[in-house]
Image: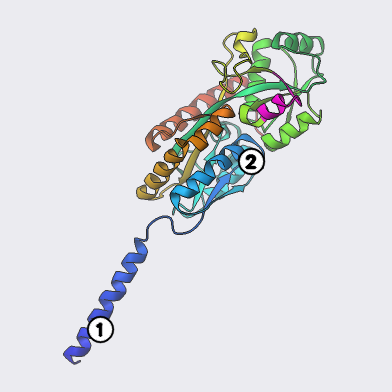
Amino acid sequence: MQASSMTRLLALSLLLGAGNCALAQAPYPVKPVRFIVGFPPGGTNDITARILVPKLSEYLGQQVVVENRGGANTAIASEMFVRMAPDGYTIMMNAPGHATNPALLKLNFDSINDFAFVTLLAESQNLLVVHPSLPVHSVKALIALSKQRPGEINYGSSGIGATPHLSGELFKYMTGVNWVHIPYKGGGPGVIALVAGEVSLYFGNVPTVIRQARDGKLRALATTGPKRTPAAPDIPTVAESGVPGYEVTTFYGMSAPARTPRAIIDRLHGDTVRALNSPEVRDRLQGLGADPVGNTPEQYTAFMKNEIAKWDKVIKAAGIKGE
């Protein structure tokens, strides 16, 4: 082969190699990102995701699209999610169900090792609300009525093992009331059922039910956190309403599939925290009773491990069974 031909082949090879290298190192992201939410539209996880998404899309430079995959307290969405490519183009909203499901269900994935945890987005508490037809205006009155009518009052939840369910079970355990649990497939359907009068009461995530309570469609009795929520400072906690020691909080986080490159995790983390700190997102979340967090991937991973261990003990001690 002539020297000139060899030179041309070598130059072509170098150009192709450089092109492949540039393709492999293309900046992330270069296409839209799917944000999986393991509940139907209308619940707190969905609301939180949709508040975050516009600003996150702006910072990532690509559209982030919320995709609802409800069922089994996020387990159905998680099982689908862990099979996704670890390329940063599919992320997921983690809810308390991620921490309670290992004790309730036979899962086809590992709740820690099959996920790359990005950041804890926000924390909030639940709000005990009743249908206006229930003749009570305080926690003490609710307890008294419930003991007069054992087994006649039902309460809804967003699913077995979700914090609305666990809030109700803890209340029953600590007060001795006898309620009937009616699980729904998410916070949105649960609140719709409550407003329609299908159930009498509900421990809803504050962002899910605060608007209906303010509009008079529901009656708020108490919050479940250790202190009053800034979103409704006039509403007392369950603990200060006659059930000392009662406390349940909830959380919303973001994860990617395991083995997602650290550079992509760092990009997602940085832009997500930046979005959480923006006035538009922070003020809307706080107005709904959710406190933005934005911790590190390592801190969020440790948090999830602790939550799984904590709820495993609570669920087994209470004898709560999965579906």
- In the rendered image, is residue 73 in sight? yes
> Which is more toward the observer, 252 or 321?
252
Residue 145, relative to residue 165: is it above or below? above
Identify the residue at image location x=44%, y=54%. Answer: 87
Quadrant location of the N terminus? bottom left
Q: Earlier in the sequence, mark 2 or mark 1?
A: 1
Q: Position of residue 271 (x, y in %)?
A: 42, 44
Quadrant location of the C terminus? top right
Residue 217 falls inside the magenta stretch: yes
Magenta stretch in the rendered image: 209-220
| Label ID, residue 102 | none
Looking at the rendered structure, the kind of residue marked 1 is Leu
Residue 296, relative to residue 53: is it above or below? above
Residue 61, relative to residue 101: is it above or below? below
Q: Position of residue 126 (x, y in %)?
A: 62, 24
Q: Position of residue 169 (x, y in %)?
A: 66, 20
> Which is more toward the observer, 297 or 240?
240
Task: Find numbered disc 2 in the image and state the secondary structure of the residue it sits on.
Answer: loop
Q: Residues within 10 Å of mark 2 (few under 14, many from 20)?
A: many
* Left/right of residue 273 with respect to residue 99 in the rendered view: left
Identify the residue at image location x=44%, y=30%. Answer: 303
* Left/right of residue 153 with respect to residue 205 in the rendered view: right
* Left/right of residue 119 with respect to residue 52 in the rendered view: left
* Left/right of residue 144 with respect to residue 303 in the rendered view: right
Q: Which residue is mark 2?
A: 39
Task: Find numbered disc 1 in the image and state the secondary structure of the residue it sits on.
Answer: helix
- In the rendered image, is residue 320 in sight? no
Looking at the rendered structure, the kind of residue marked 2 is Phe
Residue 7 falls inside the magenta stretch: no
Q: Which residue is mark 1?
A: 9
Q: Residues within 10 Å of mark 1 (few under 14, many from 20)?
A: few
